[in-house]
Every structure is written in structure tokens, then in C-alpha cells.
């Protein structure tokens, strides 16, 4: 399910960046956003 959520981020679907560190930074940012959204939804319930 996490990989399916990561595919919602356009920059991670197709790798546009040449450098690995920039791609890894976008991947970390996407994971942080996914975790924040899940925690926010749990606190609202």
C-alpha cells in the first residue's frame, strides 16, 4: 500500500532527476507527507 501511495507523487513515478541524492530527498519528503496524513487522520477519528 505504501508503494501505491508513493506513485501518487508525479516526480517519483518517473525519475526526472539525474542525481541520486535529489531523488532520495523527494522520496523522503513523500514518505514524511504520507506519514503526516495518516497520523492526522487517526487523530481526527
Image (cartoon, rainbow, N blue to C red):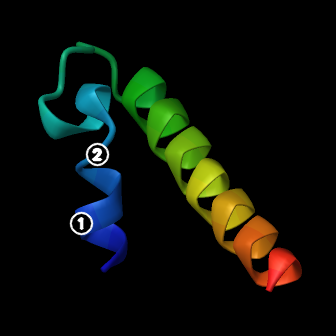
Residue at 79 percent across and 66 percent down: it is 40
Asked where in the image residue 27 lies, by quadrant, the reply is top left
Residue at 76 percent across and 82 percent down: it is 42
> On screen, 18 above or below 1?
above
Q: Secondary structure at mark 1?
A: helix
Give neighbour class at mark 2: few <14, some 14-19, many 20+ (Cα, 10 Å).
few
Residue 2 position within the rendered picture, expressed as x and y whole percent measured from the top left: 37, 73
Task: Read off the residue under disc 2.
Answer: 8
> On screen, 14 above or below 4?
above
Residue at 38 percent across and 30 percent down: it is 23
Residue 7 position within the rendered picture, expressed as x and y whole percent measured from the top left: 23, 50
Relative to 43, is 9 on the left or the right?
Answer: left
Specify the farthest residue to the front. 45
Quarter holding the C terminus is bottom right
Marks 1 and 2: CB-CB under 8 Å? yes
Residue 33 position within the rendered picture, expressed as x and y whole percent measured from the top left: 63, 49
Residue at 17 percent across and 38 percent down: it is 13
Amino acid at each position: 500500500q505504501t508503494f501505491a501511495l508513493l506513485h501518487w507523487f508525479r516526480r517519483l513515478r518517473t525519475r526526472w532527476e539525474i542525481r541520486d541524492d535529489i531523488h532520495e530527498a523527494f522520496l523522503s519528503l513523500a514518505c514524511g507527507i504520507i506519514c503526516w496524513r495518516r497520523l492526522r487522520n487517526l487523530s481526527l477519528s
